[in-house]
Amino acid sequence: MIFETVTVGMYGANCYIVGSEETKEAAIIDPGAEFNRIDKKIKSMGLTPQIIILTHYHGDHIGAVEDFVEKYGTKVYIHEEDAEALGNSAMNFTKSMFGKDMSIKADVKLKDGDKINLGELTFEIIHTPGHTKGGICIKVGNIMMTGDTLFNSSIGRTDFPGGSFEEIISSIKNKIFKYDDETIIYPGHMSPSTIKNEKKFNPFL
Ligand SMILES: [Zn+2]
Ligand SMILES: [Zn+2]
């Protein structure tokens, strides 16, 4: 597995590039802004963008999606319960964040437990509502990208439409924490952690 982080935009969102060693195809997780920087990084890694998987529909995680779709025909994957908001520029905050209407079409609507294959890699979709209704975590190998559900020593906001404090706590405890303690957490903002550290030190849990 080839793996890189690019932190983008004024909200400091983490975009993750996950590449197959075999096919040199890349999955882009949350291309939130700064298309040119992400594109350059992918090229420098010798990869070709194949799919985009979004942890949720919020503007700070989707700002560069249109550019990738236009340039590479990249397919867009999002949980079925976040697909409608992704396609509505008022709901996905792109209008307020970028002053630009971005109505993004989901090519594939995901469900809990879905698996996506890319070369030798398998991405496992874990539905973790609470920050948004259709928020997901994406596990590949021993790493898990947790979007705005679980951060290093914090959790995502629950005051946006579709948010729920009870649900986010339940998602983290029942769906994320059942994985191996050594699993490395790569969140939507800020630095990585491990499931072990979050069980021990996260003050919200
Ligand atoms: Zn968010
Ligand atoms: Zn965010």
Image (spheres, rainbow, N blue to C red):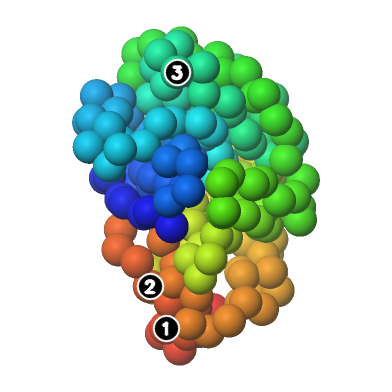
Q: Nearer the viewer, residue 189 or 74?
A: 74
Residue at 67% x, 24% y: name it: 107
Q: Which mark is residue 112?
A: none
Rounded to the nearest whole Å, what is the CA distance between mark 1 and mark 3?
38 Å
Could you tell me the amino acid type at mark 2? Ser
Rounded to the nearest whole Å, what is the CA distance between mark 1 and mark 2?
7 Å
* Crowdedness near tag 3: few (<14), some (14–19) or many (≥20) residues, C-alpha within 10 Å: few
Residue 89 in view (yes/no): no
Question: SS class of the residue under badge 2?
Answer: strand
Residue at 57% x, 53% y: name it: 120
Q: Nearer the viewer, residue 176 or 119?
A: 119
Could you tell which of marks 2 and 3 lies nearer the N-terminus?
3
Residue at 23% x, 30% y: name it: 40
Q: Nearer the viewer, residue 44 or 51?
A: 44
Residue at 38% x, 73% y: name it: 193
Could you tell me the amino acid type at mark 3? Tyr
* Crowdedness near tag 1: few (<14), some (14–19) or many (≥20) residues, C-alpha within 10 Å: some
Do the numbered discs 1 and 2 sit on residues whose CB atoms are within 8 Å? yes
Please give the residue where the numbered disc 2 appears in the rendered image: 193
Please give the residue where the numbered disc 3 appears in the rendered image: 72
Please give the residue where the numbered disc 1 appears in the rendered image: 197
Q: How many marks?
A: 3
Could you tell me the amino acid type at mark 1? Asn
Question: SS class of the residue under badge 1?
Answer: helix
Residue 118 in view (yes/no): yes
Where residue 140 sits: x, y (%)?
55, 60
